[in-house]
Amino acid sequence: MIDISAFISRISSGQCILLTGAGFSKHATNFNRREFPNGSELAKVILTDLAVPAADQADFDLRTATTKFMRDTGNDAGRLVRVLAPHLTAKKTTIDQQKLSM
């Protein structure tokens, strides 16, 4: 059996890293005052920045959208960060998320 209190103590002291799945951000609010987007929604954000018509965006997943972005922008990672940051930066978190971040 796992000793949760020891686990929490190790995380708090920096002796352990807690890795959470993508669902952990569910219900957090980003700077656009929306819940965090999933992969297909992020692909649409990237493709919209590249002015890909909405009708053509269904052919892309996050990996292919990112690949296209990097190819079309000359590997401009800074621009990709600027495009995604408002969607992936938390403005408001849930109580459970706040507890784990302490």
Image (cartoon, rainbow, N blue to C red):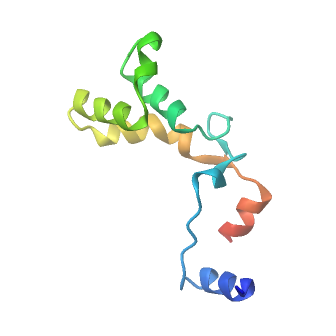
Compared with residue 93, is residue 41 higher up or lower down, i.e. above or below? Answer: above
Q: Is residue 42 left or right of residue 36?
A: left
Q: Quadrant of the C terminus?
A: bottom right
Residue in view at x 62 percent, y 39 percent: 31
**Residue 7: x, y in percent?**
66, 84
Q: Residue at x 43, y 32 (%)?
A: 61
Query: Residue 86 at what x, y percent from top left?
Result: 54, 38
In this image, 60 relative to 18: left or right?
Answer: left
Residue drawn at x 30%, y 42% is 77
**Residue 8 to residue 41: above or below:** below
The quarter holding residue 62 reads top left
User: Quick one: quadrant of the N terminus?
Assistant: bottom right
Between 78 and 35, the residue placed more toward the observer is 35
Q: Give x and y (percent) for residue 52.
A: 38, 16
Q: Is residue 30 toward the left or the right of residue 70 in the image?
A: right
Residue farthest along the right direction in this orientation: 95
Q: Classify residue 79 by image quadrant.
A: top left
| In the depicted structure, whether residue 68 falls above or below residue 18 | above
- Which residue is the extreme one toward the front? 1
Where does residue 59 sit, x and y in percent of width and height?
40, 21
Query: Residue at 68% of width from left, 35% of height from top?
Result: 33
Q: How many marks?
A: 0
Q: Residue lying farthest left?
A: 74
